[in-house]
Image: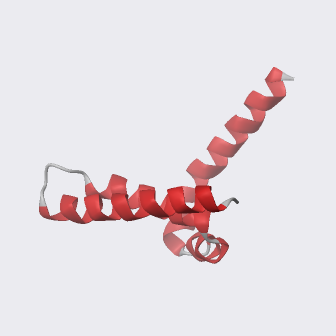
Amino acid sequence: MSNIKRIFYIIIAILSFVIGVIGVVLPIIPAYIFFGITVFSLMRVSKKFSAWIKSTKIYNEHIKKYVDKFINWKDKKKDTLK
């Protein structure tokens, strides 16, 4: 990954984390969405962080099925376009 993409994802992670923390204090802003963006951005930057998140119980029980569905949908879309 190029340095520009890494910097972009780090900036997105920092901004979404700050907005998520503000969302914890202010009930108007949904904090969990911004924390999800933070995790997604950091997974793109760090292979170690990505491996750690994928090894957690929460990821395996709740998130993995949606990620797998998205990947399968993406592959099916590519196959139909060929």
Locate residue 21, reporting x and y percent: 24, 66
What residue is shown at x 56% (from left), y 72% (from top)? Answer: 53
Q: Is residue 75 left or right of residue 31?
A: right
Residue at far top of view: 81
Q: Is residue 34 left or right of residue 82?
A: left
Residue at far right of view: 82
**Residue 43 picture quarter:** bottom right
Which quadrant of the rendered structure holds the N terminus? bottom right
What residue is shown at x 20% (from left), y 58% (from top)? Answer: 23
* 49 versus 63 height, above or below: below
Locate residue 74, reporting x and y percent: 70, 37
Task: Tell me, yes or no, if residue 62 can be seen here.
Answer: no
The answer to which of 6 and 54 lies nearer the viewer is 6
What residue is shown at x 19% (from left), y 62% (from top)? Answer: 22
* 22 versus 55 height, above or below: above
Task: Tell me, yes or no, if residue 8 can be seen here.
Answer: yes
**Residue 51 picture quarter:** bottom right
Locate residue 12, reporting x and y percent: 43, 56
Locate residue 50, reporting x and y percent: 61, 69
The answer to which of 11 and 34 lies nearer the viewer is 11
**Residue 34 picture quarter:** bottom left
What residue is shown at x 64% (from left), y 77% (from top)? Answer: 48
Render colour scheme: secondary structure
* 40 versus 71 height, above or below: below
Which quadrant of the rendered structure holds the C terminus? top right
The answer to which of 5 and 33 lies nearer the viewer is 5
Number of marks in the rendered image: 0
